[in-house]
């Protein structure tokens, strides 16, 4: 009888577990933008060096916040009517502020000897706030940088993320940085995006993954992220009029992300501007606003920042719900197998030849010569590939009717024909196997141009 009851109890637990995992991605995205406003917390070794990019061999002995109080941070967030926080668990120089077993370069070998991530999640949850974590792929201390990346680096990333998503309860989202950015130059192939994405979803199915550098990709689709992100200080600005994707916009309330010695006596950003030009407008555009507040070397937030947060809370009425998200395509998370492969096309001018159509840049394009009546563009794989997704970025949004084909055993076969005036033409279909993939353009309103012709073998 006891065994039967125990089996029944396990069955209930399994059912509950599956129920928790049953939230679909769209529901999670809606839940996230419904949070509206959160606190970014840049706090790590750079706090103690007066440099956002410190020497990667900085001695852990400098990390000594003698009055560290994550409860103060959480109460400050509450005063601004924020609903979540996000802490820099590891920044670009590789110092981990949790009790990691993956490296000695961590907070437990500093004078503090306390798990800051643990104290942060406990403090924010005590105030009823959601918890996000920031994690940098670029890690200069461990030589996880261009030209040095090995399989052991991939394993390091996965091991560290496993700790963060196993030991600290439910994490609403991971904000990943230093990945596929022009300044980090670590590609989604160097550290495989789909491997990391699947690990995150396996460990915590309800955890969103955000790449902080996803604004490099067009605003019409989610490439390599569950939430589109915009870093205002880097010149990335969401369209408040046309955005249709779940989004995040970030900005520091002080002059830079990490604390500097001048911060206590330097004016912070105007609370009224934060409310009127950011919070209120972003929330109407399916975008949450995350405002960075940098703790000082004592581990506390400065008085001027605390006062500004309180003022934001007084000014912001927070009386309008975020609207339901419009329809949009699921995110692309797989490797683009067409990138940099040999390509051919119908006639194009010399300065805009076919190589620009799969060069991993949306700033360049293959452009058909106006004299060509039925332009075509194809990618030629070095060996047969399986694939089930093709995305065409129509630079001028002029392509109207077209066909997608693939070559198998010397024969061209039609995948589909379409009448589509979208700028980004996304086609997902049953898996095929072939050596070439082609678009043939039957109708366009002007000579067509393709910025990126992308092919994927998505794993569902």
Image: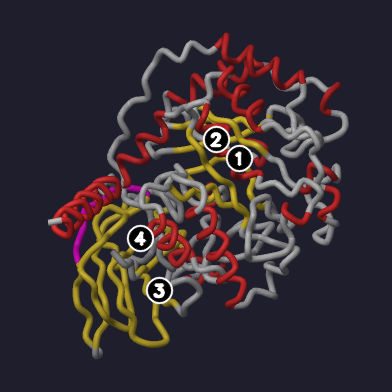
The spot of residue 119 in percent (x, y) is: 62, 39
For marks 3 and 2, give the CA distance: 39 Å
The correct choice, above or below, for 407 with respect to 140 in the image is below
The spot of residue 115 in percent (x, y) is: 65, 47
**Residue 448 shows in the view:** no
Label 2 sits on residue = 249
For marks 4 and 2, give the CA distance: 26 Å
Label 1 sits on residue = 231
Q: Are marks 1 and 2 in contact (CB under 8 Å)?
A: yes
Label 3 sits on residue = 345
Q: Which mark is residue 208?
A: none
Q: Are marks 4 and 1 in contact (CB under 8 Å)?
A: no
For marks 3 and 1, give the CA distance: 37 Å
Q: Which mark is residue 391?
A: 4
For marks 3 and 4, give the CA distance: 17 Å
Closer to the N terminus: mark 3 or mark 2?
2
């Amino acid at each position: 009888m006891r065994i039967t009851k125990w089996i029944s109890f396990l069955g209930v637990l399994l059912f509950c577990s599956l129920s928790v995992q049953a939230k679909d991605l769209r529901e999670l995205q809606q839940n996230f933008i419904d949070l509206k406003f959160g606190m970014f917390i840049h706090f790590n070794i750079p706090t103690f060096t007066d440099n956002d990019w410190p020497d990667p061999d900085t001695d852990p002995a400098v990390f000594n916040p003698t009055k560290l109080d994550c409860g103060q941070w959480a109460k400050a967030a509450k005063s601004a009517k924020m609903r979540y926080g996000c802490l820099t668990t590891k920044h670009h120089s590789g110092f981990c502020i949790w009790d990691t077993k993956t490296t000695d370069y961590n907070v437990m070998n500093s004078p503090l000897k306390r798990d800051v991530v643990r104290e942060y999640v406990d403090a924010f949850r005590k105030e009823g706030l959601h918890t996000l974590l920031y994690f940098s792929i670029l890690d200069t201390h461990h030589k996880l940088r261009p030209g040095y990346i090995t399989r052991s680096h991939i394993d390091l990333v996965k091991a560290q993320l496993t700790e963060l998503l196993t030991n600290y309860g439910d994490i609403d989202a991971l904000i990943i940085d230093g990945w596929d950015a022009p300044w980090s130059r670590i590609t989604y192939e160097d550290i495989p995006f789909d491997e990391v994405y699947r690990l995150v979803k396996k460990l915590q199915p309800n955890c969103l993954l955000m790449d902080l550098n996803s604004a490099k990709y067009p605003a019409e689709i989610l490439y390599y992220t569950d939430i589109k992100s915009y870093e205002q200080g880097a010149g990335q600005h969401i369209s408040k009029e046309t955005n249709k994707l779940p989004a995040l916009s970030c900005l520091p309330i002080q002059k830079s992300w990490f604390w500097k010695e001048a911060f206590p006596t330097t004016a912070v950003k105007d609370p009224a501007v934060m409310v009127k030009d950011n919070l209120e407008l972003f929330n109407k555009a399916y975008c949450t606003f995350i405002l960075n507040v940098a703790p000082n070397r004592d581990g506390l937030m400065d008085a001027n920042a605390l006062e500004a947060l309180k003022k934001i809370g007084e000014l912001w009425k927070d009386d309008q719900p975020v609207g339901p998200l419009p329809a949009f395509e699921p995110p692309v998370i797989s490797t683009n197998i067409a990138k940099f492969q040999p390509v051919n096309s119908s006639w194009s001018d010399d300065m805009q030849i076919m190589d620009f159509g799969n060069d991993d840049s949306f700033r360049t394009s293959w452009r058909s010569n106006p004299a060509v009546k039925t332009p075509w563009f194809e990618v030629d794989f070095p060996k047969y590939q399986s694939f089930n997704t093709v995305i065409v970025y129509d630079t001028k949004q002029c392509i109207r009717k077209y066909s997608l084909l693939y070559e198998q055993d010397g024969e061209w076969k039609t995948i589909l024909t379409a009448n589509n005036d979208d700028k980004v033409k996304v086609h997902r279909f049953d898996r095929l196997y072939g050596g070439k993939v082609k678009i043939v353009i039957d109708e366009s309103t002007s000579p067509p141009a393709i910025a990126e012709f992308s092919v994927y073998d998505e794993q569902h």
